[in-house]
Amino acid sequence: RTLSAECEGLADAWISVDDGETAGGVLPKHDISDWSTGRKTCFLDSLIGTCTERKRPLSLSTVASMKEMYRMHQSKNSEVLFRFCMLAVEAGDESILPVVVRFVTTQGRMKFLRPLYRAMFRSGMGRDVAVSTFLGNRDFYHPIAAKMVASDLDSTKSEKKKTLGGLVCGLPRPLVIGGVLVLSAAVGVALLRGKRR
């Protein structure tokens, strides 16, 4: 519990900086270079949790200060890099986009892919980058991961399912068109048989 308290305390100090509560914007002087991955992820999870609770991301200046001080955007650890990228994208840090693109194109775990693609897509700065990156790398991902990310990036999907004569129109177009053609052919054959009798 002592280690997590230290991580949460550092997160609280950064939130104070972000909220402008520190005198003269003094940054925390805590060195985390020797911290384990678990401690770093605890720190980042605490920041993410606080931002979620207050319904406001970190400011761009706070993220920039963290980048300069901790260099987490250069981390070789996926857990640390993922969490920091999420914070930076939510803050609107355009300079993190090349890091995110490199990250999502060098590994294919859905636990990292989907949240990062969704975050980029939701942000104004990263929407086009998310779509073009996914389209250029779709074959790299496992088919299920590709399908799920494609679904996340589909901005045209509606919350309501449209129906046409009881048929669900939310199905893929070739399937719907094929079904309509088969139905039309069946009706045509039935009509022709009826005329012959």
Image (cartoon, rainbow, N blue to C red):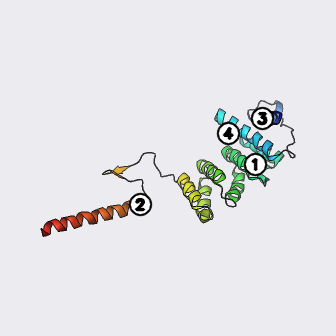
Q: In the image, which is nearer the foreground, mark 1 or mark 4?
A: 1
Pick whichever of labels 2 and 3 is earlier in the sequence.
3
Q: Which residue is mark 1?
A: 80
Q: Which residue is mark 3?
A: 8
> What residue is pinned by disc 4?
57
Mark 2 burial class by Cα count in 10 Å: few <14, some 14-19, many 20+: few
The residue located at (60%, 60%) in the rendering is: 134
Q: Tell whether 61 sits left or right of 191.
A: right
Q: Residue drawn at (72%, 52%), measured in percent from left and top? A: 95
Can you say whether 98 is above or below 9 in the image?
Answer: below
Q: Secondary structure at mark 4?
A: loop
Which residue is at the front of the view, 27 or 86? 86
Place of residue 151 in the rendered image (x, y in percent of width and height, measured from the top left): 53, 54
Assign a secondary structure to mark 3: helix
- Identified by mark 3, the residue type is Glu
Label 3 neighbour load within 10 Å: few <14, some 14-19, many 20+: some
Mark 3 vs mark 1, CA separation in Å: 16 Å
N-terminal-most mark, 1 or 4: 4
Dot 3 or dot 4: first in sequence order is 3
Residue type at mark 1 is Val
The secondary element bearing badge 1 is classed as helix
Q: Nearer the viewer, residue 17 or 100?
A: 100
Considering only order in the chain, which callout, 2 or 1, is on the residue closer to the N terminus? 1
Q: Which residue is mark 2?
A: 173
